[in-house]
């Protein structure tokens, strides 16, 4: 359904994102995991043509055979919303504070259909129900600030799926939400993806969240895909040192007495900090922070295949003999 | 042999290398300069020019400003010896303009600086006050901004007599609420930041925080506002002089020069055009400067220096 | 080392109307932190956790009930005693980038608590040592906040807070605004410095995992009320209250 090839995004001469090849099949759920400054949002925005005006995008992004890069604006506007939906990041910033909810959802519908008022209203109620929001009459009449964060996020999802798109892009949809609400929203996205046979591209900085929702994950660092494959297997047996470091640095919920309190040995960090645009090293983007860097890391590292559907670009990957999740 | 070469490098090459470094420096400065907003450059030139001729007037003017030369009245622009002509008393127009510049700047600088200082203090106090006090004083300031300053000036002139003092005092009274209001918004925003709370958390007192943390962080707003106020002050001073409540004879003022030239419009139109143009250029210069400073200072806040 | 006692504590930003309506931001809090203890306060948005921690260090006025630091009642402090209190308790903030004056160099920023509370100017060597204690080089003293990463700034915030040798360190979501790869560093630093300097620490977080890894005891806050409290291991591994269980489940679902 979605094929990204040789995508290259640069701003002011600095490479912000480059993806050699990435494919997403119909109905599949893939996660983009990366920290701030990893370029994951830039890749996603380029798919929708929403990248900043100063960004130069080259390469190919084909959606159902249609080339999206360089496509005329009118055609892109037609695809946006109707075929590809976007759930943006912060609900407090993404909803029009002066417009009632009902009107905002209706707007999304009427942009891509000629349906009459009654039909649109019916569809609005249907969508509010789809996103499991109770009391549709109250929701339709409400303004965004009258709803909780979780409710606002559901509204954003409703707007995004209004035209039953084939692909839903969710950009950090739960980052601004409480953890209890997060679970509900994640479950909702999972359910909707299955019910509507809708592909999902989930962007997050948390591996755990992505593993819950997605089948496949692409770990992104320095604008490049460091590792790509099945979410479960990558987390269990990562190949790229960065993925491994990310997993080790994750502060996980203690599961037994030993893991609770006072055991700071289990708290790992990655040396250094994420460089800003233009300050990444040549060759492997991670090599300055990696304890296992070797000479070949200095030059460009192409993607290599570890297993079926498991790719990475590490010169010195973790071998199956090594224990995973071992960092300094 | 090696020492010879080294000597060659340190002696012969040095001036060439120094020049290369110098050229690179010049190149960098030029790049930085050409990135400045056009409004800043043009405004800067106009204001700079104004300042120069105002300062110049303390040491030299083409002619004695009060010298009257009845034989050379109404000379047009470009006459020999009188670059901008003469007025109906035979006084050199260029000299009048230069002296007028000095007066304009004198009035506008004093009134702007004083009102800015008082207004900023008031604004900081209100921003930090919160609650009812903030509410009451804020609204009083809003009322103050709404009162037409020209009326205040007329009343003052009637009370203490016309002249620069009345003009300065009127402008100050008019500008204090304006300056205060401009400061309150950004100050409140800065006060909501964590580092302000942190400062209180390690024992700092209110006014220390206001002067050392809030003021530096709203300085760009104040600077821009100052330029705009300078422009307005020049215009107000000219207007007051035009109405007769500003600087009195023999102190030169663009506004009065303009007023005196009004009945002579048919005989010598240049006598109106020149001071009018002077006022326009001065106000334009400060406005452009303010606009350019705003453009220059704001994006820099978010960009890495 | 100092101990904190909170008894029958109620707080509202509008205390007069709260007394009439009975609706408080924080209600009926009773807990204590022993000297050298490490308390975690867990709650979601609207739970009042940030308000509580500001009450503990005197940044918000006490409205009802008791907050005692080393037996000293926070509600009845003179201005002089308030300064002493500030020397005893310091707070580090969620977003390190916003807790530094963007116009001040780091060296000047971290010298502020000493200048203000100890009325002296620390030497360059002292400042360099402060940075070294959190693993940073002296060269950062001359930098501006925007030149440093979030992780570095948070460590500097810790150094700044500890510069006046407080007995109590309060941390308001110290890891939430940091990149995932460096969150553990800030947390580890707080835990290690606590051991080293024998501090009492109160850490607020919405993340059960963060609190679970380093604290001795936990209180769970919901809508301004403590729903569960106790030893960290007990509360985490054997939550009694439905809300705590909900929190634990939600955290487990996305845990690695």
Image (spheres, coloured by chain):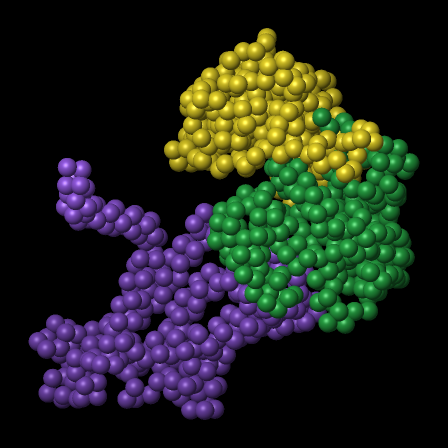
Q: Which quadrant of the view contains residue A173?
A: top right
- Please tell me which residue lies in front, B182 or C27: C27
Tell me where residue B92 appears, x and y as whole percent: 17, 81
Position of residue B248 relative to residue C250, above or below, is: below
Position of residue B95 relative to residue B10, above or below, is: below
Chain letter tied to purple:
B
Tell me where residue C255 appears, x and y as whole percent: 73, 28
Residue at 18% across / 86% down in the picture?
A: B64
Q: Is residue B10 left or right of residue A164?
A: left
Q: Colour of chain C?
A: green
Residue at 41% across / 82% down in the picture?
A: B167
Tell me where residue C216 appears, x and y as whole percent: 81, 42
- Please tell me which residue lies in front, A211 or B117: A211
Q: Colour of chain A?
A: yellow
User: Does the rendering let one see residue A297?
Assistant: yes
Residue at 47% across / 86% down in the picture?
A: B156
């Amino acid at each position: 359904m979605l094929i990204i090839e040789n995508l290259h995004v640069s701003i002011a001469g600095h490479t912000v994102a480059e993806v050699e090849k990435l494919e997403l099949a119909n109905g599949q759920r893939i996660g983009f995991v990366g920290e701030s400054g990893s370029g994951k949002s830039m890749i996603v925005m380029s798919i929708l043509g929403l990248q900043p005006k100063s960004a130069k995008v080259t390469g190919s992004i084909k959606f159902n055979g249609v080339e999206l890069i360089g496509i005329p604006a009118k055609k892109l506007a037609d695809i946006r919303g109707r075929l590809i939906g976007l759930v943006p990041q912060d609900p407090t910033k993404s909803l029009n504070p002066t417009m009632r909810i009902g009107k905002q959802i209706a707007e999304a519908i009427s942009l891509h259909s000629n349906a009459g008022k009654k039909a649109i209203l019916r569809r609005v109620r249907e969508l509010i129900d789809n996103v499991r929001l109770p009391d549709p009459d109250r929701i339709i009449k409400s303004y965004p600030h009258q709803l909780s964060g979780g409710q606002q996020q559901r509204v954003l999802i409703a707007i995004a799926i209004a035209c039953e798109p084939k692909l839903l892009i969710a950009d950090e949809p739960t980052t601004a939400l409480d953890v209890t609400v997060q679970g509900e929203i994640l479950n909702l996205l999972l359910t909707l993806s299955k019910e509507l046979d809708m592909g999902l591209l989930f962007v997050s900085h948390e591996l755990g969240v992505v593993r819950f929702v997605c089948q496949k994950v692409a770990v992104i660092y320095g604008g490049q895909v460091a590792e790509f494959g099945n979410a479960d297997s990558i987390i269990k047996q990562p190949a790229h040192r960065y993925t491994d470091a990310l997993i080790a640095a994750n502060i996980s919920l203690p599961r037994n007495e030993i893991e609770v309190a006072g055991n700071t040995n289990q708290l790992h960090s990655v040396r250094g900090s994420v460089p800003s645009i233009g300050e990444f090293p040549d060759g492997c983007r991670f090599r300055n922070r990696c304890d296992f860097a070797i000479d070949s890391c200095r030059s460009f590292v192409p993607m290599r295949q570890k297993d079926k559907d498991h790719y990475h670009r590490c010169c010195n990957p973790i071998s199956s003999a090594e224990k995973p999740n071992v960092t300094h | 042999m090696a020492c010879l070469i080294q000597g060659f490098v340190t002696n012969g090459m040095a001036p060439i290398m120094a020049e290369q470094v110098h050229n690179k420096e010049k190149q960098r400065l030029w790049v930085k300069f050409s990135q400045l907003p056009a409004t800043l450059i043009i405004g800067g030139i106009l204001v700079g020019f104004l300042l120069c001729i105002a300062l110049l007037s303390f040491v030299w003017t083409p002619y004695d400003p009060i010298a009257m030369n009845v034989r050379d009245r109404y000379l047009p622009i470009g006459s020999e010896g009188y670059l901008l002509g003469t007025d109906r008393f035979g006084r050199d127009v260029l000299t009048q303009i230069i002296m007028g510049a000095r007066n304009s700047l004198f009035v506008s600088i004093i009134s702007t600086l004083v009102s800015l200082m008082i207004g900023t203090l008031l604004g900081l106090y209100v921003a930090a006050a919160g609650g009812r006090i903030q509410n009451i004083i804020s609204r009083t300031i809003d009322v103050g901004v709404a009162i037409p300053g020209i009326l205040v000036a007329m009343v003052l002139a009637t009370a203490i007599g016309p002249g620069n003092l009345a003009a300065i005092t009127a402008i100050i009274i008019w500008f204090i609420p304006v300056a205060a209001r401009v400061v309150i918004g950004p100050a409140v925003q800065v006060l909501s930041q964590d580092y302000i709370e942190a400062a209180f958390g390690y024992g700092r007192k209110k006014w220390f925080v206001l002067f050392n943390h809030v003021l530096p962080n709203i300085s760009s707003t104040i600077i821009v506002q100052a330029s705009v106020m300078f422009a307005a002050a020049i215009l107000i001073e000219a207007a007051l002089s035009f109405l007769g409540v500003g600087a009195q004879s023999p102190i030169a003022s663009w506004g009065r020069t303009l007023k005196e030239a009004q009945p002579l419009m048919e005989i010598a139109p240049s006598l109106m055009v020149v001071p009018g143009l002077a006022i326009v250029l001065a106000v334009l210069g400060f406005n452009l400067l303010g606009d350019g400073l705003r453009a220059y200072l704001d994006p820099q806040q978010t960009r890495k220096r | 080392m100092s101990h904190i006692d909170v008894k029958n504590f109620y707080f509202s930003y509008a205390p007069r109307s709260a007394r009439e309506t009975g609706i408080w931001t924080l209600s009926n809090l009773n807990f204590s932190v022993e000297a050298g203890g490490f308390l975690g306060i867990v709650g979601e948005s609207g739970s009042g956790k940030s308000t509580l921690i500001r009450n503990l260090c005197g940044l918000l006025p006490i409205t009802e009930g008791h907050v005692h630091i080393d037996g000293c009642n926070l509600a009845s402090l003179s201005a002089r005693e308030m300064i002493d209190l500030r020397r005893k308790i310091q707070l580090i903030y969620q977003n390190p980038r916003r807790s530094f004056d963007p116009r001040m160099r780091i060296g000047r920023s971290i010298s502020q608590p000493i200048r203000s509370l100890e009325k002296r100017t620390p030497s360059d060597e002292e400042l360099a040592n402060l940075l070294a204690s959190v693993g940073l080089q002296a060269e950062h003293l001359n930098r501006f906040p925007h030149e440093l990463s979030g992780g570095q700034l948070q460590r500097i915030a810790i150094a700044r807070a500890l510069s006046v040798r407080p007995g109590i360190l309060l941390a308001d979501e110290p890891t939430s605004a940091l990149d995932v790869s460096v969150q553990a560093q800030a947390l580890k630093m707080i835990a290690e410095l606590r051991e080293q300097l024998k501090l009492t620490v109160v850490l607020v977080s919405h993340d059960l995992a963060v609190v679970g890894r380093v604290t001795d005891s936990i209180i769970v806050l919901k809508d301004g009320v403590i729903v569960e409290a106790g030893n960290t291991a007990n509360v985490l591994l054997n939550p009694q209250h439905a809300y705590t269980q909900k929190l634990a489940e939600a955290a487990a679902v996305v845990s690695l």
